[in-house]
Amino acid sequence: MPPSSSTDALRPASTAGSRPVNDANRLGLDFKRESACFGYDGPITDIHTHISSPAAARLYFQAADDYGVGHAWTMTGLDNARRNTAELEPALRDRLHYIAVPDYAKRDDPDTFTTQWHKDLVSFYEEMGSRIMKLWAAPRARDFAGDALLLDSPNRLEGIRIAYETGYRVFMTHVGDPDTWFQTAYADAGRYGTKPDQFKPLEKLLDRYGDVTWIGAHMGGNPEDLDWLHAFLERHPNYVVDTSATKWQVRELSRHPKRFVQFVEAHPGRVLFGTDIVANDDNLTPPEAGGPETGGGYDLYASRFWALRTVIETDYAGPSPIVDPDLHQVDPSVDPKSTAGLRGASMPADLLPMLYHGAASRVTGHA
């Protein structure tokens, strides 16, 4: 039964088994009811999403409303951003803010990551009001565009110059990927480099553009080693991180929840809440309504809010509801539908306003 009043908070996962199972909800949770289990009721900003259509934005904000998320910063191609702006109702359009990125859907066009990207940077700034630009430089970027997306390639350095001269003063980067990927997909270090190699060009740029705030996506690409990340932030006061890439973050932060608390305490205003939710027309329909077996619809988006808030706010100890493919990739004997274990960090209440909203407000200038 639902709680009898707003003060009768649910415990995380107390609705297990009440809904159909899919890859975003292996526990059968009623995510809408589960949203009542969290004590924090202040503003929340999602600094890291990928919302590419009006229909997906509407569904994203249904889940966002249940989990207290007011505004979202999103990455999608310029054509999609223009469509969202033209078709979304003003109440939702005003909650969606754009981070300038290339149009990865057009990656077969050789200009997409070079000359067109340089033009799009200006268009995002002037048309969409973008003030953050994203530099995706994951190791697998080599498979997308050769050297063009390397953080220190001539093409990327030219894009950074254009962004800076246009007026951008917040750059987001993705340079590291999970340790599990370096054990599997990136095992060829001759092609992809080692994990430490990914951060060398970033350090040079952090020093070169010292008046820019750099957001390290996905806990700076290294939630596995918060001691290393702490030292990195100590060396670079213009560097902050976000909690995006939910499956990865909840798996690794759950391995050392107390250290996660210590990290946030040591770096007030430098950890931003983000989910990395990918919201598009392909994942709107839930499986029980004929959608893909891998899940979709409301559960796909709400599961990310639930998992991150559970790790941050609660003392829950149990399975994640989200299938984690990395577990099977590292050990093929593990069931492909396995989920990681979650252990809540029980973040002290006085840290939550800054983590959930204050840090993003400082970085973006948006109240």
Image (tube, rainbow, N blue to C red):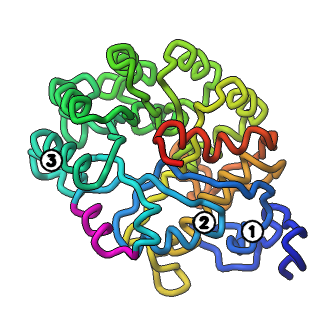
Above-or-below relation of 166 to 191 = below
Q: Is residue 317 left or right of residue 297?
A: right
Q: Which mark is residue 302?
A: 2
Above-or-below relation of 81 to 286 = above
* Magenta region, residue range: 79-89
Verify CB contact (< 8 Å) between mark 3 and mark 2: no
Residue at left offset 40%, top offset 76%: 89
Secondary structure of the residue carrying numbered label 3: loop
Q: Is residue 108 left or right of residue 101?
A: left
Most common SS among magenta residues:
helix
Residue behind mark 1: 34
Residue at left offset 54%, top offset 30%: 222
CA distance for labels 1 and 3: 42 Å
Answer with mark 1 or mark 2, whichever residue precedes in sequence.
1
Answer with mark 1 or mark 3, whichever residue precedes in sequence.
1
Answer with mark 3 or mark 2, whichever residue precedes in sequence.
3
